[in-house]
C-alpha cells in the first residue's frame, strides 16, 4: 500500500520523534501509543508493517517481528497541528506487550 505523507509535513519534537496513536481499522478501538522517527515512518510507508522507535532501547522495532503480533498499516493520518500521527491497522494477535489486545485494557476511570 502506498502512503502519501511527506516527512516535511511533520512537526518532529526536539528528539526527532512524533507520537503515533494506533487504532484498529475495523473497530476503531485504540490499541496503543508508540513513537516514530523518520526512519520508522519511511519503513512503515514502504513495507506496510508498523515500525516504531524504541526510546528505551534507542532502536527501530517492527511490531510483531518477534511475537508474531503484527500490525498491517492500512492508513496513516496526520493531525491538524502536524504533531501526532494516527496509524489505522489490521492487528494480528495482541497489541500490548502484556498479551492484552490493547494497551488500555487495564484501569479505567468511568464517571
Image (spheres, rainbow, N blue to C red):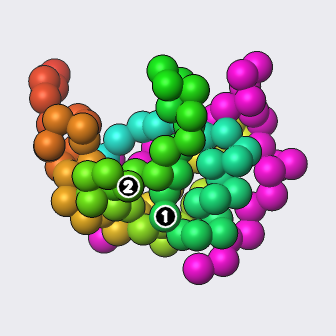
Q: Is any atom of residue 22 visible in this view? A: yes
Helix, strand or loop at mark 1: loop
Residue found 67% across the figure and 39% down from its top: 37
Location of residue 11 by image quarter = top right
Q: Which residues are magenta?
A: 1-30
Which label's residue is closer to the chain start, 2 or 1?
Answer: 1
Residue found 70% across the figure and 57% down from its top: 42
Q: Is any atom of residue 23 visible in this view? A: no
Frontmost residue, 68 versus 4: 68
Kindly identify which numbered label has been placed on residue 65. 2
Q: Is residue 55 left or right of residue 89?
A: right
Location of residue 33 by image quarter = top left
Q: Which residue is mark 1?
A: 49
Q: Residue furthest front?
A: 66
Kindly identify which numbered label has been placed on residue 38. none
Frontmost residue, 79 versus 97: 97
Residue 91 x %, y %? 30, 63
Residue 10 x %, y %? 77, 43
Residue found 74% across the figure and 29% down from its top: 16
Amino acid at each position: 500500500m502506498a502512503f502519501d505523507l511527506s516527512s516535511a509535513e511533520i512537526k518532529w519534537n526536539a528528539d526527532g520523534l512524533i507520537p503515533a496513536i494506533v487504532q484498529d481499522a475495523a473497530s476503531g478501538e485504540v490499541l496503543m501509543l508508540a513513537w516514530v522517527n523518520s526512519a520508522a515512518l519511511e519503513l512503515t510507508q514502504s513495507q506496510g508493517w508498523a515500525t516504531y522507535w524504541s526510546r528505551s532501547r534507542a532502536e527501530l522495532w517492527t511490531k510483531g517481528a518477534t511475537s508474531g503480533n503484527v500490525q498491517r498499516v492500512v492508513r496513516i493520518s496526520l493531525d491538524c497541528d502536524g504533531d501526532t500521527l494516527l496509524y489505522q491497522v489490521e492487528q494480528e494477535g495482541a497489541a500490548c506487550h502484556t498479551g492484552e489486545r490493547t494497551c488500555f485494557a487495564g484501569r479505567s476511570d468511568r464517571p
